[in-house]
Image (cartoon, grey):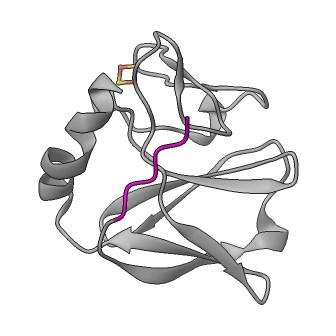
Amino acid sequence: MTVTVTYKGQWVAVCNIDDLIEGEASVFKAGGYEIYVVPIDGEIHVYYGRCPHAFGELAPSDFDGSKIVCNVHQWEFDPKTGASINPKGAKLFRLESEVRDGVLYVKVPQIPVVEFKEKYFKMYESL
Ligand code: FES
């Protein structure tokens, strides 16, 4: 099940979609947030680039083309839903995104990261 969490934020141009490579993740930074971009099967999935286990920073190399494996303690996530595969019950935080005129825009949360972590991230630890 896909859970969509709405949040206040500011739309930021992150990259040209031509710069993304199918099956390879990229990390961008904006407003103090890491933005994890995963193009797979013709769709672009965008997550907050931190792991819901212990807030580990996701790296491009964590995506092996079929799943995202956090490099800190090896939790595994489905790149299309953000749901954890092993162990089950956690989820990456999907950031709102859209493509306009070939540019990927991401809605970056407008609150400080520490506040965001408290308000939105803890809930994902138990999904
Ligand atoms: S911080 Fe990602 S698995 Fe622990």
Look at the magenta stretch and give its main secondary structure: loop
Q: Is residue 20 above or below residue 60?
A: below
Residue sticking out furthest to the top: 87
Kindly indicate the quadrant of the structure image that contains residue 5: bottom left
Residue sticking out furthest to the bottom: 101
Q: Is residue 30 above or below residue 28?
A: below
Picture coordinates of residue 23, whole percent (x, y): 82, 42
Q: Is 119 displayed left or right of 127 in the figure?
A: left
Count numbered badges in the picture.
0
Q: Is 20 displayed left or right of 37 in the figure?
A: right
Q: Quadrant of the C terminus?
A: top left
- The reply to whether the magenta stretch includes residue 74 is no
User: Of residues 103 and 41, which is closer to you in this image?
Assistant: 41
Residue at x 13%, y 46% (from the top left corner): 118
Picture coordinates of residue 121, whole percent (x, y): 26, 42
Residue at x 49%, y 22% (from the top left corner): 71
Q: Quadrant of ligand 1?
A: top left
Q: Which residues are magenta?
A: 1-6
Q: Is residue 46 above or below residue 76?
A: below
Q: Quadrant of the N terminus?
A: top right
User: Of residues 84 and 67, which is closer to you in this image?
Assistant: 84
Q: Is 91 displayed left or right of 122 in the figure?
A: right
Residue at x 24%, y 48% (from the top left corner): 120
Kindly indicate the quadrant of the structure image that contains residue 78: top right
Picture coordinates of residue 51, whole percent (x, y): 39, 33
Residue sticking out furthest to the front: 1
- The reply to whether the magenta stretch includes residue 2 is yes
Picture coordinates of residue 7, whole percent (x, y): 31, 67
Residue at x 61%, y 38% (from the top left corner): 81
